[in-house]
């Protein structure tokens, strides 16, 4: 064993974690090497003193006033909720307009529903409902458990309708009635989330 | 997550004041030992709690609040020290490269025990490694990452710190 090995293993030696062979080699080297012996001695002397150090040293009494003066007011949760709800409402208007435009344009001539505008319309509804859902999720604790349970049941029904319409549209992409049902389900979901978000904001 | 933390997360500074009173001693002791200067430790303790207030919304309760706060304090103090070391290097390299790493002549007020006084008098790098490893229980790998040094450097600094402390206590 050389000095570097002793340094490498000193903490394990102190913790009693070396096997017998390694411990004997360690002790044999430390006994013959003044440098390593000094390191071992220092660690042995310091270990109990370090363990006895107080873990807590109270600061001066007036420290808190300096901190309190620097705490920026945190924007209340209901403002964050309102901002998110407003963002979601804008997304909803954009999505609804896009859907209306699609219906107007598609009335005159047959336009496949799975054209370029369809993903954008759907993305608008998905974004609107996701934003509202995030806002609502952060404030879930404000709502009564019964309200949360009702919301979750209704959302599950709407999500099932959305999934069903999307699957049907995938098999029949030119069917405008199916598309209308899909957009109506999205509108229903966003309206429900908006309603419950407002409710959470008022409690 | 305790009710106090939840209220502080919502912006209740009274609740945050209660959290401060609960944890200030532990954070102040850490800052005092890492810095070795009571005036600077007071400033850093304040900075730690202001930073904690700013970051509290990111605390998810995955670890204990005391662990989260302790880690935040270590990061803040070491970042501050790295800036100080950089400043010291710029100021002293040309004239005296070892000046910023020399042991201090005398520790600042606020440290009562012999060992704490000896720790305060250590050179900054050796002091940080000793406090993190021997007092706070960090591993060399973690210390190396936190301080931006090689693991071998952390080990070398620890042996240096222990020898200097032994010498100081034997006086």
Image: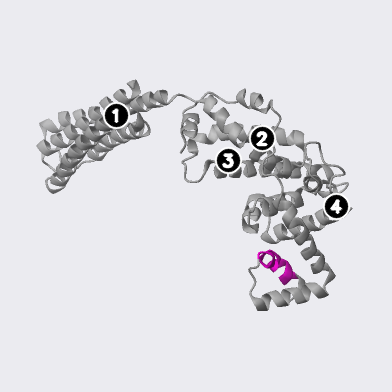
Q: Are marks 2 and 4 on the same chain?
A: yes
Q: Are marks 1 and 3 on the same chain?
A: no
Pick the front one: A132 or B51: B51
Q: CA distance from mark 2 to mark 1?
A: 40 Å
Pick the front one: A155 or A99: A155
The residue wearing badge 3 is: B69
* Quadrant of the image occupied by residue B27: top right
Name the front one of labels 2 and 1: 1
Left/right placement of residue B8 relative to residue B99 reads: left
Return the chain for callout 3: B
Magenta residues, start to end: A4-15
The local secondary structure at tag 2 comes to helix
Q: Which mark is residue B168?
A: 4
Residue B61: where, in percent of width, then height?
47, 42
Residue A128: where, in percent of width, then height?
30, 32
The residue wearing badge 1 is: A144
Q: CA distance from mark 4 to mark 3?
A: 32 Å
Q: Are marks 1 and 4 on the same chain?
A: no
Instruction: Count residues near mark 4 (Cα–Cα under 10 Å), then give few for <14, some for 14-19, many for 20+.
Output: some
Q: What residue is rendered at 71% in x and 66% in y? A: A10
The local secondary structure at tag 1 comes to loop
Q: CA distance from mark 1 to mark 3?
A: 33 Å
Q: Which mark is residue B45?
A: 2
Number of callouts:
4
């Amino acid at each position: 064993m050389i000095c570097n090995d002793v340094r490498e293993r000193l903490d394990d030696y102190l913790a009693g974690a070396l096997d017998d062979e390694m411990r004997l080699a360690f002790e044999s080297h430390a006994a013959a090497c003044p440098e390593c012996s000094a390191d071992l001695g220092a660690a042995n002397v310091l270990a109990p003193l370090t363990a006895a150090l107080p873990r807590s040293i109270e600061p001066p009494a007036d420290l808190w006033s300096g901190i309190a003066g620097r705490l920026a007011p945190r924007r209340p949760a209901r403002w964050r909720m309102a901002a998110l709800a407003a963002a979601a409402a804008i997304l909803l208007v954009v999505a609804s307009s896009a859907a209306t435009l699609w219906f107007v344009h598609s009335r005159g001539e047959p336009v496949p529903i799975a054209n370029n505008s369809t993903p954008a319309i759907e993305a608008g509804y998905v974004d609107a409902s996701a934003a509202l859902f995030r806002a609502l999720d952060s404030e879930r604790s404000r709502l009564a458990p019964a309200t949360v349970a009702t919301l979750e049941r209704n959302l599950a029904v709407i999500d099932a309708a959305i999934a069903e319409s999307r699957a049907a549209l995938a098999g029949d992409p030119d069917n405008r009635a199916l598309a209308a049902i899909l957009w109506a389900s999205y509108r229903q979901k966003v309206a429900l989330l908006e309603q419950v978000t407002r409710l959470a904001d008022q409690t | 997550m305790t009710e106090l933390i939840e209220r502080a997360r919502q912006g209740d500074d009274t609740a945050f004041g209660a959290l401060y009173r609960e944890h200030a001693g532990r954070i102040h002791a850490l800052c005092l030992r890492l810095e070795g200067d009571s005036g600077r430790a007071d400033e850093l303790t304040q900075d730690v709690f202001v930073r904690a207030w700013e970051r509290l919304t990111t605390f998810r309760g995955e670890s204990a609040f005391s662990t989260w706060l302790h880690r935040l304090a270590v990061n803040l103090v070491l970042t501050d020290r790295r800036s100080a070391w950089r400043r010291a290097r710029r100021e002293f390299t040309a004239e005296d490269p070892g000046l910023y790493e020399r042991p201090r002549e005398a520790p600042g007020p606020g440290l009562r025990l012999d060992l704490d006084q000896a720790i305060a008098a250590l050179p900054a790098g050796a002091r940080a490694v000793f406090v993190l490893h021997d007092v706070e229980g960090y591993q060399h790998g973690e210390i190396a990452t936190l301080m931006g040094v090689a693991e071998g450097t952390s080990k070398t600094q620890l042996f240096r710190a222990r020898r200097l402390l032994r010498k100081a206590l034997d006086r």
